[in-house]
Amino acid sequence: MDESGTGSANSFSGLLAASLALFPARFEPMTTALRFRRLIATDLPLLHEWLQREHVRAWWSRRESFDEVVEHYLPAIEGRKPTDLYLIVLEERPVGFIQTYLLPDHPDSAELVGVGTGVAGVDLFIAEAELTGQGLGAEVLRSFTREIVFAHPTTIACVADPHARNAVSLRAFEKAGFHKVNDFLDPTDGATHTLMRLERPV
Ligand SMILES: CC(C)(COP(=O)(O)OP(=O)(O)OC[C@H]1O[C@@H](n2cnc3c(N)ncnc32)[C@H](O)[C@@H]1OP(=O)(O)O)[C@@H](O)C(=O)NCCC(=O)NCCS
């Protein structure tokens, strides 16, 4: 199911060209194209601004005031909540957000999706609408699961639960090697979500 072949590579090259057009002045050919950096408190105004963008609001929990964003994300930044928050950095520019957590640390979610010990969750968005639909999301998921999620030797699988109608997200997860497990109703938003799962690579 991993489709990291020529087609993806070509579209990712196109994506890099698009990112250079967006951020031409700072490009340095020798920098690593894609990396993840821990979110810090001074990133919260940027995160707040990203969360108001239409293409993000459509599929992400709405937090409209800056105070709501601080209340939700600062505890994790300060190590008081067991969720690891990262900026997605492309060519040294923050272009999105991704988080991971162990499901047993969030018992309500774990019970809802029916998973347990050793299973991590992941959620992400690409903040620049112009950079979506070109292979970046799938590439982020491949890199992030390899470098961050499965860096923990006890993590046996990674799951995500996009809205069942979020075809773009489902396709990005599928391209990164996730498979569909089942649809379920999430009582917190009343919507049908699709549980996607990636086993630890052997
Ligand atoms: C979801 C998201 C992270 C995916 O990243 P991305 O860079 O757009 O994804 P990719 O380009 O790697 O893959 C998207 C795929 O969906 C396809 N696609 C685009 N529009 C589509 C549509 N209307 N229906 C079905 N597939 C569609 C693309 O063609 C691509 O597949 P392909 O490479 O086989 O052609 C990004 O779109 C995003 O941040 N969206 C807004 C927030 C969000 O939905 N977050 C996810 C919450 S779980």
Image: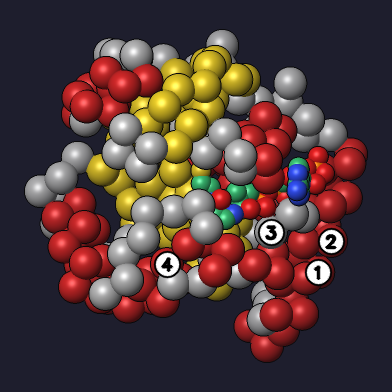
| Marks 2 & 4, CB-CB < 8 Å contact | no
Q: Image quarter for residue 139?
A: top right
Q: Amino acid at mark 3?
A: Thr
Distance from mark 3 CB to nearest ligand 1 atom below 8 Å: yes
Q: Which residue is mark 1?
A: 17
For label 4, the residue is: 51
Disc assigned to residue 86: none
Q: Quadrant of the C terminus?
A: top right
Q: Position of residue 121 (x, y in %)?
A: 39, 32
At a point 19% along the width and 73% down the height, the residue shown is: 67
Nearest-to-viewer mark from 2 and 4:
4
Left or right relative to 115: residue 146: right
> Residue flagged by tag 4: what amino acid is it?
Leu
Residue 132: mark:
3
Q: Is residue 54 visible?
A: yes
Question: Residue shown at 81%/69% (left/top)?
Answer: 17
Percent across and percent down for residue 55 are 58, 63
The Cα atoms of the two marked residues, 1 and 3, are separated by 13 Å
Q: CA distance from mark 4 to mark 1?
A: 25 Å
Q: Is residue 80 left or right of residue 62?
A: left
Tell me if residue 153 can be seen. Answer: no
Q: Which residue is mark 2?
A: 14
- Name the kind of residue labelled 2 in the image: Gly
Q: Residue at x 67, y 81 (%)?
A: 23
Closer to us: 26 or 98: 98
Residue under the point 52% across and 58% down: 58
At label 3, counting other C-alpha atoms closer than 10 Å, the crowd grade (few under 14, some 14-19, many 20 or more) is some
Is disc 4 in contact with disc 3, using a CB cutoff of under 8 Å?
no
